[in-house]
Amino acid sequence: MQREKAFCPYRICPLGAHIDHQYGVVSGFAIDKGIEIEYEKTADGKVSLTSSDFEKKVEFSINKPLQKENDWADYLRGATASLKRNHDLSYGIKAYVKGSLPIGGLSSSAAVIIAFLSALCRVNNIVLSDNEMVMTALWAENEFVGVSVGKLDQSCEVYSKKNHLLYIDMKDDTYDLIPASREMKPFEIAIFFSGLERSLVGSQFNMRVDELKSAAYALKAFSGMEYGKFSDTRLRDVPREVFENHKDKLPKNWRKRAEHYYTEFERVQKGAEAWKKGDIETFGKLSFESGHSSIVNYETGSEQLKKIHEIMLETNGIYGGRFSGAGFKGCAMALVDPEYKDEIAFEVTRKYLKEFPELSGKFGVHFAKTADGVNL
């Protein structure tokens, strides 16, 4: 039987980190690296999966109830369960999953879900709209795997367009694709992989989401706003002036998380304006500020990623950058001048491995360009 391929790009988020689940505004790109799945249809409904990144082979059936088994394929069990909510499935797939970059910080979980869904839809003659793909993939992570992510990753991987900045409002899913200005200096994307893989499950990610929601709930109560259900509460509901008037009543950590939200929201707006003008230096500076706020206010970042951020600040040819993804392990991203690529790779590697020599052979520098989102 002829094998087919499905591909979903990774994404980077230069501005808008950690605020999508609070219905903030975010920005991002898809890149020309991602998850590829080679697959063939199975008539008995069995899904059989092997991966270049994980030794364990996984099998399950589309015809049986699906439950978490706490392995790498939970995201794909969740994708199957999510698709089954609204569509009848007759066929499974036998598939091989491989990524073009190391796992961690590039939304590999969302990318593998979307690539897998693309394959499963194709063999079952299902066509999803862009929004349906985003929401189907999101349900798999939120409800099945149990990670309280927002729609940033899925949206970037579906809606993005090459050489455009995706600017999206997570409150109503309206978005704009802002083309790179003719006046903009050349740029590429650098990915600095720390050598440590990350997993959102069991990390502090869900705790941070709860702290933001708690801040929003408390601010509503302090100001006399209607506060309704905690589960429905987002900081987007709370005007900035309410935060400024009542922030001193919040526990320190809640106040710091909220400070990140409001300042990041402003950085995204300023970044979009800078991008429209072709001012990549200002855009990059805002991305560096975003990374600083993630460290100081949102308090994410392993020691390794903090060191990469510090090195990026002092390296010629880097316009700006920050952690990519949640920032607990994973990698960092930067917008760079292509003329400095060799110097950047050498200097960042030299300085990083001086601090963490045990990660020699695991740390890596990769370069990418912007790309279109997944072809549905």
Image (cartoon, rainbow, N blue to C red):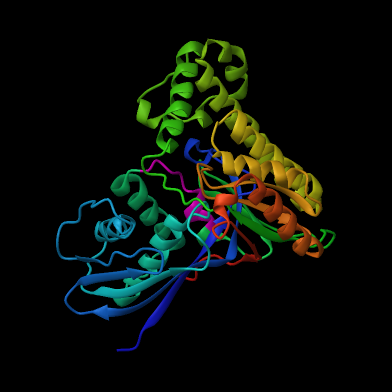
Q: Is residue 8 left or right of residue 73?
A: right
As drawn, which residue projects farthest toward the left?
64
Q: Is 149 in the magenta?
A: yes
Residue under the point 27% across and 79% down: 41
Give residue 287's position: percent from left, percent from top.
Answer: 69, 43
Q: Is residue 311 left or right of residue 210?
A: right
Asked whether the viewer can see residue 176, the reply is yes
Asked whether the viewer can see residue 194, the reply is no
As drawn, which residue projects farthest toward the right?
183
Give residue 173's position: percent from left, percent from top.
Answer: 51, 48
On the rendered image, what quadrant is the C terminus found in? Answer: bottom left
Q: Is 160 in the magenta?
A: no
Give residue 220's position: percent from left, percent from top.
Answer: 47, 18
Residue under the point 59% across and 63% down: 31
Residue under the point 39% across and 40% down: 148
What stretch of residues is rendered in magenta?
Answer: 147-156
Q: Is residue 204 left or right of residue 18?
A: left
Q: Is residue 298 above or below residue 46?
A: above
Q: Is residue 252 above or below residue 6?
A: above
Judging depth in this view, the residue of 188 and 278 nearest the camera is 188
Give residue 52's position: percent from left, percent from top.
Answer: 40, 69
Judging depth in this view, the residue of 83 and 175 nearest the camera is 83
Q: Quadrant of residue 207?
A: top left
